[in-house]
Amino acid sequence: MVLRKTGWRIVTLAVAVYAAASAERPGRAMDFKPTPPADIPNVSPLPVARDPQTGARLVWGGPVPPAAVGREPAYAPSAVPEPVYSPPEPPAERGPGDYGRTYPVQEATLPPPSAPDIVDDGGALPDNEFDPWEGLTEPEVDVPEPPARRAPGNREAVPSWASLGGDRQPAPVARPPRGALERETPGGYRPMAQSEAMCRRELRKLGVRFTDLSTVSSGRFCGIDNPVRVTEAVKGIAMSPPATLNCATALRVARWLQGDVKPAARWKLWKSPTALINLSSYRCSRIAGSRTISEHAGGNALDVGGFRFADGSVVKVEPKGAFSWREKPFQNEIRRASCRHFGTVLGPGYNRAHADHLHLDTKARLRPVCK
């Protein structure tokens, strides 16, 4: 209770002191003087309204009394200019990439076009008179640079033609024009297909000795366009007697002898073959007992009658008995291996006509015939 009374007394005393201090400074609130509008930059004074009859200044509630007409405020201007209306300026066009900024638009001026430059091409002919074959009618000759040799007692290299005396140089050798070789070729030669030339190249790699023959023709259905006369079937194995075949058949025979017959003779007979016995190669005939033209009529077939070996012995192709314990495995081996090289293989056991030889031909078949 005592504390409450004491608090109210303190508050009352503080209010009295504040009121006394405010009363001692009565003119403090009137010390503020407003700044005349003329002192503020970019601020135009407000126009003063006057009565058109008396010329007295008008205020809210009527005209100003005559006693107060001469007491103009210090900041009021003596002459107020009339406001002048000016239209707003149009906004400037914005350029590309403008983010809130304006740029003046300037028109680019290009220089006037100049006259085209005329280039002197040395008197070249127009296109309609240009000859594209000019300069290409003569064959081009590549003259190799002569090797330099060293003169005795001189370190500088001199050309080999310097010994001729003077400035003479060897004349270039002119190449013959196209067609000259064909005209100068002696008679008796004929063009050969690329496949035939490649086949003969393979024959030479295997050591086959052969001679190219003229075209063979023995009737309407018999003949060989590019026959070869084989005297050595493969390197080391002669063809006895020589056989007339086409190149493809001669190549298959050579590969069969090189890859199968030679190894079989070495491992089964312990011998080395030196000759193949030829019973028949090219002949114009039909298959026995039919009207079908034989493969021999095209040079596609060879009948093998046997082999001769280095010791002078001969192994014939024929039915082998139980006591031929070396020759029978050899014959079976080469007969089985021949089915990988030829389209048709017929031998002993097939029929009576093939009881004494192996018939090998290169007829194209889906599956080879081995009987």
Image (cartoon, helix red, strand yellow):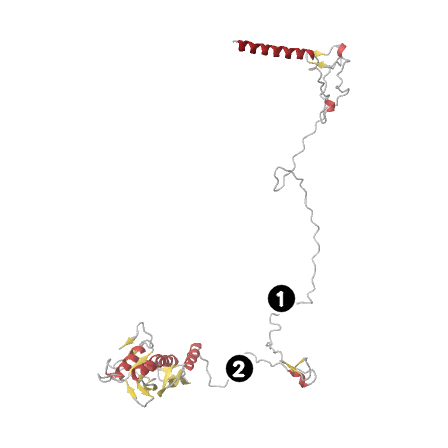
- Marking on residue 110: none
Image quarter (top left, top right, bottom left or bottom right) of the C terminus: bottom left
How far across and down, in percent of the image, does residue 69 sit?
76, 12
Density class for disc 1 (Cα within 10 Å; few <14, some 14-19, many ≥20) is: few
Density class for disc 2 (Cα within 10 Å; few <14, some 14-19, many ≥20) is: few
Q: How many marks?
A: 2
Q: Are the residues flagged by discs 1 and 2 in contact, CB closer than 8 Å? A: no
How far across and down, in percent of the image, does residue 218 sit?
35, 84
Residue 301 vs 14, above or below: the answer is below
Q: Secondary structure at mark 2?
A: helix
Residue denoted by label 2: 181
- The answer to whether 78 appears left or right of 197 in the picture is right
Residue 37 vs 323, above or below: the answer is above
Looking at the image, tell me whether mark 1 or mark 2 is earlier in sequence order: 1
Q: Secondary structure at mark 1?
A: helix
Q: Which quadrant holds residue 141?
A: bottom right
Please identify the residue farthest to the front as the structure is shown. 2
- Front of the two marks 1 and 2: 2
Is residue 215 or residue 237 the one in the foreground?
237
Residue in the picture at 59% in, 11% down: 10
- The answer to whether 268 appears left or right of 227 in the picture is left
The amino acid type, in three-letter code, at marker 1 is Asn
Is residue 51 or residue 145 the one in the foreground?
145
Please identify the residue farthest to the left as the structure is shown. 322
Residue denoted by label 1: 128
Asked whether residue 194 is in view, the answer is: yes
Is residue 193 or residue 132 the one in the foreground?
193
The amino acid type, in three-letter code, at marker 2 is Leu
**Mark 1 vs mark 2, CA separation in Å:** 36 Å
- The answer to whether 212 appears left or right of 26 in the picture is left
How far across and down, in percent of the image, does residue 66 sit?
76, 10
